Image: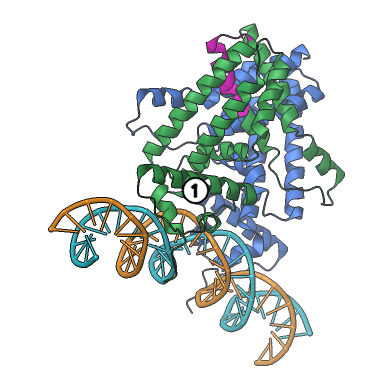
Chain colours: A green, B blue, C cyan, D orange
DNA sequence: TTATATTACTGACCACCAGTTATTTAAAGA
DNA sequence: TCTTTAAATAACTGGTGGTCAGTAATATAA
């Protein structure tokens, strides 16, 4: 049997955490390189230079890898978003910031749009609870930052975020179709496809929603 | 070799179309029974009682089956939606109709939320063009019905639909998580999960968007 | 220093997948 | 009845997610 690719085993809890973080870092690289649908545990293990079976010591399933990546990326987005906000922003400026910061990591939205329908299945209840609590904390931070930026109450901000997240994910999906620039498409089809602009759809309608919240419905 | 499961071969164009429709009907049954992620060509073939290879005579890939199902379901939804509308509707009534008619077929939204990011990949350009043209026609019909129902211009209706579709798909995803009713969840997690109500999120914010469109931005 | 116990790691294995294809055979036409 | 065409079959290919018997690194006891 050839020498093991892993030259030092993770024995202590710290070493195991480091190993888990290394796997997540490699998972992010692999996801960015091949996309969600082509992501595989064999490909991830190859990138790490160790055996596929080892991955299952640290993650129960492939979806638990995605769930953990989601948490990391939501945390990074929350931080970037807060840094982009300041008190008394115009609604449009706020919405642009939300969209732009979400786009900083190209893998965030593809993960978010699969979170409920794909990723949350096939994970342990424990892992799901941890992820939900993390998401809830991020929401609270988003809401706090939003209250200050838009001069909204906490309740209004939470209301707003419960609309903005679905709208963002829904709008982002329209950007996730296949690359068709080099294809010979009929003009009507090209025009139809181009009529969906995720940024425009999101920011314009997010502003309308903010307007509606301010008006008190 | 046992007698072939297909007792009569599809030779004429009409017979081939019928065969293709039979496959789509069985695909709908299989999708409804097992859900998108567990859907398989082997399972579909088994449900039809013939060989998996036969499916590839009528559909180039698994995703082309989904694409064709999307078209059928969008057409059915468009029809049901138009039937649910009448002139001079309240915005809330219109939005409820949009959500309710989308929910009539439980497989519609799971397909729509995967259309851009998953299904549209791995299909031929020809099939995609046909599907996009069908979708565009449905949109035009949605827009026409919407103009009458809400007393909006055609341009306003198209603007509205380009917001409502992403919002609907985004909101619907929050309902697609795993069934957790029987799980012992901490109260804060349970509360957080329950704070996402797809119908409420969609109708409330769709009304805000309509309001914003009427106000002229 | 040596023996033993523990457990991290390996990679072959299992049961499936999407898609392909060499062969069989149904059926149309001469 | 024979020939031609192509629909249909089911074995095949190359892969997947996840498992697990065996190996070996490493901590601990004697």
Q: Is residue A166 magenta?
A: yes
B48 relative position to B149: left or right: left
Q: Secondary structure at mark 1?
A: helix
**Residue B20: image x %, image y %?**
64, 58
Q: Is residue A162 magenta?
A: yes
| SS assignment for the magenta stretch, majority | helix
**Residue A86: image x %, image y %?**
66, 15
Q: Where, quadrant-wise, is the C terminus of chain B in this rendering?
A: top right
> Looking at the image, is A180 positioned above or below residue B84?
below
> Which of the 4 image quarters holds residue A191?
top right
**Residue A174: image x %, image y %?**
69, 37
Residue drawn at point x = 50 percent, y = 47 percent: A22
Q: Which residue is mark 1?
A: A23
Residue drawn at point x = 85 percent, y = 47 percent: A186
B51 relative position to D7: left or right: left
| Range drawn in magenta | A151-167
Residue drawn at point x = 62 percent, y = 17 percent: B92
> Looking at the image, is B128 positioned above or below residue B113?
below
Which of the pair B209/A142 is nearer the observer?
A: A142
**Residue B27: image x %, image y %?**
56, 52
Which of the pair A203/A149 is nearer the observer?
A: A149
């Amino acid at each position: 049997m050839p020498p093991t690719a892993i030259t030092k085993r993770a024995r202590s809890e710290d070493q195991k955490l480091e190993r888990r973080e290394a796997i997540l870092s490699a998972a992010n690289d692999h996801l960015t390189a091949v996309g969600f649908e082509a992501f595989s545990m064999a490909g991830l293990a190859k990138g790490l230079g160790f055996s596929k079976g080892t991955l299952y010591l640290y993650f129960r399933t492939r979806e638990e890898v995605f769930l953990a990546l989601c948490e990391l990326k939501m945390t990074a987005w929350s931080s970037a978003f807060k840094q982009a906000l300041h008190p008394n922003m115009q609604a449009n400026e706020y919405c642009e910031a939300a969209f732009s910061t979400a786009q900083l990591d190209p893998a965030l939205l593809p993960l978010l749009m699969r979170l409920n329908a794909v990723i949350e299945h096939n994970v342990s209840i424990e892992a799901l609870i941890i992820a939900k609590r993390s998401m809830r904390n991020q929401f609270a931070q988003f809401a706090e930052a939003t209250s200050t930026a838009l001069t909204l109450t906490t309740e209004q901000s939470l209301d707003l975020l419960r609309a903005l997240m679905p709208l963002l994910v829904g709008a982002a999906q329209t950007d996730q179709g296949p690359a068709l620039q080099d294809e010979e498409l009929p003009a009507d089809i090209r025009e139809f496809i181009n009529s969906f602009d995720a940024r425009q759809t999101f920011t314009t309608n997010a502003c309308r929603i903010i307007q509606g919240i301010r008006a008190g419905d």
